[in-house]
Amino acid sequence: MSLESKPNKKQPYYGSGWGKANQMAMDAVNEICQKCGARAVCVHHIIPLSSFENPNDAHYPENLLPVCFSCHAKIHQEMRKGLPKKKYNKTS
Ligand SMILES: [Zn+2]
Ligand SMILES: [Zn+2]
């Protein structure tokens, strides 16, 4: 049974490589939040998926940040505060 190949309306579509990339990022830090040292529950994309044409291009190690739930929420709060949105240009 595969849930990951099914795009979900509520969640951005992470691409077929996400399950593995997510697991590798978690394993690399022993599931420790990179912000506070608590147990990481999710992996944040430093450059958002929406900046990539192909979501699979976003899943490289330097772009993945395993964090706990509250740190992840904080990161996204900061992003919403209107930090200048960096456009990542793949062709440059
Ligand atoms: Zn944390
Ligand atoms: Zn995130």
Image: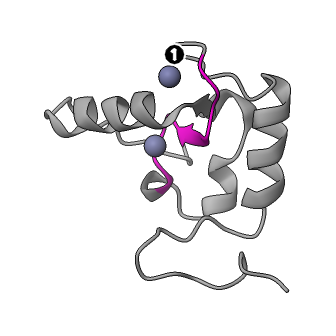
Report the front residue among 51 and 74.
74
Q: Confirm if mark 1 falls within 8 A of ligand 1.
A: yes
Q: Give the image quarter of residue 67.
A: top right
Give the magenta-colored segment's residue range: 38-49
Q: Is residue 42 magenta?
A: yes
Res 39 → quadrant: top right
Total number of numbered discs in the rendering: 1
Residue name at image x 55 percent, y 71 percent: 13
Where does the image place residue 50, in percent across and percent down from the top left?
A: 43, 58
Q: Position of residue 45 (x, y in %)?
A: 53, 41
Q: Is residue 50 above or below residue 86?
A: below
Residue 31: x %, y % from top left: 74, 29
Q: Residue furthest top?
A: 36
Q: Residue furthest front?
A: 38
Where does label 1 land, which residue? Answer: 35
In the image, residue 35 lies in the stretch drawn in magenta: no
Q: Residue at x 81, y 24 (%)?
A: 30
Q: Secondary structure at mark 1?
A: loop
Mark 1: give few (<14), some (14-19) or many (20+) Cα within 10 Å: some
Residue type pointed to by label 1 = Lys
Instruction: Give the left or right position of residue 19, taking residue 56 as reference.
Output: right
Q: Residue at x 50, y 54 (%)?
A: 49
Q: Is 84 placed above or below 91 here?
A: above
For the N terminus, the quadrant is bottom right
Q: Residue 6 at what x, y percent from top left?
A: 65, 85
Q: Is residue 20 above or below residue 67?
A: below
* Direction from residue 34 to residue 78 in the image, left or right: left
